[in-house]
Image (tube, helix red, strand yellow):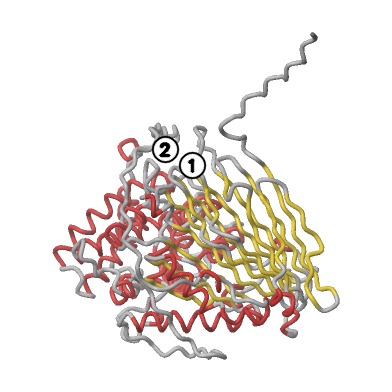
Amino acid sequence: SSSSPQPKPMAPVPLSRRAQHGSAALTAEQVLGATSLTRLSHRAPLRLLPMDPAATSKAGAAWCALGSFGGGLLGGDHGELDILVKKNATLNLCTQASTKIYRAKRDRVAAVQNLSAVVEPGGLLVVTPDPLVPFADAHFEQALTFDLRYKNEGGEDNDLASAVVVDWLGAGRIAGGERWAFETYTSRMEVSWTQEGSDPKVSPRLVEALTLQGYGSDEPSEVLLAASGMGSFDAAVTIIASGPRAKEVSARLQKTSTLLAARAGVRTRPCLVDTVAPVKLPELDGKLFMAVSPAPAQAIHRPPRKPDQPRLPDAADTVVARIVAERTDDIYRILYSCLLPLGQDIGLVPYVDRIHGKGGHPEPKVVERQGLKRRMPEKSSDESDATTEAPISAKQQAALMQLSDATLPTGGFAHSCGVEAASQLGFFNKLSISEDEAVRQFITVAALSTLRLQGPYVIAAHKLFAGGTTTGNLQAWSDLDLKLHSHLVSNAIACKASTQQGTALCRVLTYWLQASGKANVKLPRSGHMATSFGLATALLKLPPNVALRALSHCSVRDAVSAAVRLNLLGPLQAVEVQASIMENVLKETSKVAHTDVADAAQSAPWVETAHASHDILEARLFVT
């Protein structure tokens, strides 16, 4: 008898798939008085799932969930999402669950997810994801850009686009013992306002940039190392609300921030913002800190404008809220309360199905993990050690001493660098460590975060005037200063302190150069501290690395001085604290010296939260 043919053996299935490069596109358009998704496409690893609840259809809005095959992204995955919300359309982009960022492969390539959205006049885009959960040893990068269009400088509310965006980072798989165990996390969120028919390149911008190194990295970020003593935060959230259709959300965010501070025992200034419905704080399981910074349209614009730059309408007023919390469920409760007005526009209140009962959460234990062995990065050949640097002359030493002298009238001692707000909010009231150690950690983290964000701008400004003259470079300096302003405007307190000190330094430099026989050097009348400091050190012939260290010294000195005047540190103890902090900060200057301004980012979300809360304090000693 003839034998039947044998089936061919199947090829072995690989245990891990290759990295995927996918894209997705989504267009929301108003059709017959209701919003419809007129374009929807996706390719792995991204996936778009249209949702059509009855309440959403009744409100005339559209919902869509962003997901992925497998519930997350692997190392090397790259996803690009393009969103277009046309005139008067309403779109809510959500997720079905948290987005997982899985452990990176041996090549350590990061998972990347980028979102680019354009919202036309009258449109509303709401982005309400669940938290991003990075697994141990994960690498992740994201860029979120939102272009809000408007018709003219004045106009009605429907002449300007609106957006409410939630960006949410979780600590990781907390139940499994992983808290902040990822390797690297980089996020950049940029909001711009563009008049129809104008060049987007000249549009005013607001930038929120954050770079963290978790416990899984070779050099963990201080914000995470200090978290063990400052409070085990499970999540950090940034919320941006802009435009006429987000006014009520903006008001509730500001009201909620004030009420939370008052609940914590802080004497707060009365919140002058009115809300349509009264704000009632939910009961919380753990500690939650929230700060809201208003960014008025004219503060974003920062006059004087360029001749080709249109005026931003007042309806573009924006608020930026920051939240850090010990419990993820608490953030859901606060977000639900603050985003309640959106129910009228999108049919359902975001996160309404995420609210659960209060209490009963055991404290998770952090398991000590053995990560992959990594080779420490080799030092670049162009990075010089302090021992190999050329010595500065006696004239340069004199200029350095005067520039960093506490009596230089730049107003540095009027600012507490967030120490006063942190003290009143209870950031230093921890049983696990002493108050003075908590203050030391806070100032260290704040100084390093400031250095990483503003240090690259000091170097860039210094390079513009390395020849010792300002001829032909003031416009380039002004453009650089405006880029730094787009980072700082989201924190009104930090922006105010930077502007006041930078403007004072420009004024001081005018008199200083007159004494040096350089009275004919043209100087800017105002600017931020970092760019003005780079300008000053270049004209005083100080090397760029010396400029970085001098600025770090001034910021640490001012913060420690504030702690002394607030009776958090003794005068003699402050000497030891400042010396130990500077030892840590100086180690970072060589890295920052080679960081491009495009990569500048802050690294301490909870410090930003404390700093931005200063304005709600009723009894305060410092300006900021």
Residue at 51% of width from left, 66% of height from top?
238
**Mark in front: 2 vs 1:** 1
Left or right, 569 with respect to 504, comes to left
**Foreground: 373 or 203?**
373
**Foreground: 178 or 318?**
178
Residue at 27% of width from left, 50% of height from top?
583
Left or right, 252 with respect to 428, comes to right
Q: What quarter of the picture does the N terminus occupy?
A: top right
User: Residue most toward the right?
Assistant: 32
Whether residue 408 is visible:
yes
Name which of mark 2 and mark 1 comes first in the sequence: 1
Q: Is residue 115 above or below residue 78?
A: below
What label sits on residue 383 in the rendered view? Answer: 2
Give residue 464's position: percent from left, percent from top. 54, 52
Element class at badge 1: loop
What label sits on residue 103 in the rendered view? Answer: 1
Q: What quarter of the picture does the C terminus occupy?
A: bottom left
Give residue 147's position: percent from left, percent from top. 69, 65
Which quadrant would residue 174 be assigned to in this image? bottom left
Q: Is residue 175 above or below residue 329?
A: above
**Foreground: 330 or 623?**
330
Q: Residues within 10 Å of mark 2 (few under 14, many from 20)?
A: few
Give residue 19's position: percent from left, percent from top. 62, 38
**Foreground: 446 or 32?**
32
Give residue 292's position: percent from left, percent from top. 47, 76
Q: Is residue 5 above or below residue 13?
A: above
Q: Residue type at mark 2? A: Glu
